[in-house]
């Protein structure tokens, strides 16, 4: 007599086979990456569990499995953004071998792609706005600023370093929002005025 369907479903060990969910060690990271994509497109106000899950290509339940709240997802996503930008900042300053080269590196940061990339800029402003409303997120911005200042501080005294850090932030924002962005030569002059021409 041919085996029944129940018998056919049994493995060689005689036990019924059950589907196993494949373990994805990168799923948490994929979710936070997707969250940044959603924030860039919809803003923090328009970011939801469903949109993040759809962007990540994961079940909705994966978000609540890996994260306790939407706020936790946002914090991890923005931490990833801050670390990415700080990594680029440190790499740019690491290429400088002296104060003159460091001044040139600061100018490149203000005028270059790292801080002026449209997506990164939108995400950064979303972080700033959220950190104003949620003080706990200032841990992310504080850590970001600390790394930036440490990179600049290899070449300049503490007071000058703070001024340059603020200048980088302010001029980058000014260039992003102005209909007539400040030309590079004016950026160079601003840096030289703070540092002091050699």
Image (spheres, grey):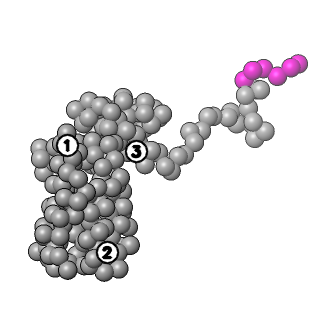
User: Dot 2: few (<14), some (14–19), or many (≥20) neighbours within 10 Å?
Assistant: some
Mark pair 3, 2: CA separation: 34 Å
- Residue at mark 1 to residue at mark 2: CA–CA distance: 27 Å
Q: Secondary structure at mark 2?
A: helix
Q: Residue at x 72, y 23 (%)?
A: 6
Q: Where are the magenta residues, as a range?
A: 1-6
Measured from the top left, where is residue 178 in percent x and y? 18, 42
Q: Which numbered marker is on residue 180?
A: 1
The dominant secondary structure in magenta is loop
Q: Position of residue 2 (x, y in %)?
A: 86, 20
Instruction: Specify the quadrant that holds the C terminus.
Output: bottom left
Q: Quadrant of residue 10?
A: top right
- Secondary-structure class at tag 3: helix
- How many numbered discs, if any? 3
Residue indicated by mark 2:
101
Viewer-side label of 3, 2 = 2
19 over 90 or under it: above or below: above
In what element is the residue under mark 1? loop
Q: Whole-percent x and y of residue 182?
A: 20, 51
Q: Residues within 10 Å of mark 1 (few under 14, many from 20)?
A: few
Up the image or down, 89 lies above or below 81; here it is below
Query: Which of the 4 image quadrants contains residue 83?
Result: bottom left
Of badges 1 and 3, the one in the foreground is 1
Can I make out residue 178 in this image? Answer: yes
**Disc sitting over residue 145 in the figure:** none
> Does residue 183 belong to the magenta stretch?
no
The image quadrant of residue 180 is top left
Tell me residue 23's x, y (percent): 54, 46
Q: Which residue is mark 3?
A: 33
Residue at horizontal 26 percent and vertical 78 percent from the top: 99
């Amino acid at each position: 007599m041919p085996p029944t369907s129940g018998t056919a479903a049994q493995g060689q060990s005689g036990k019924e086979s059950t589907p196993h969910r494949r373990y994805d060690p990168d799923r948490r990271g994929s979710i936070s990456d997707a969250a940044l994509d959603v924030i860039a497109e919809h803003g923090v106000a328009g970011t939801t569990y469903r949109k993040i899950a759809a962007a990540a290509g994961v079940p909705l339940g994966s978000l609540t499995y890996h994260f306790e709240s939407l706020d936790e997802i946002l914090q991890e996503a923005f931490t990833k953004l801050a670390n990415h930008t700080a990594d680029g900042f440190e790499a740019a300053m690491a290429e400088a071998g002296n104060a003159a080269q460091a001044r040139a590196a600061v100018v490149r940061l203000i005028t270059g792609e790292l801080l002026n990339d449209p997506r990164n800029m939108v995400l950064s402003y979303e972080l700033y706005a959220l950190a104003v409303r949620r003080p706990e997120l200032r841990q992310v911005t504080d850590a970001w600023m600390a790394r930036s200042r440490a990179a600049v501080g290899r070449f300049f005294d503490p007071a000058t370093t703070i001024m340059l850090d603020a200048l980088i932030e302010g001029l980058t924002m000014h260039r992003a929002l102005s209909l007539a962005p400040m030309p590079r030569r004016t950026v160079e002059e601003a840096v030289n005025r703070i540092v002091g021409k050699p």
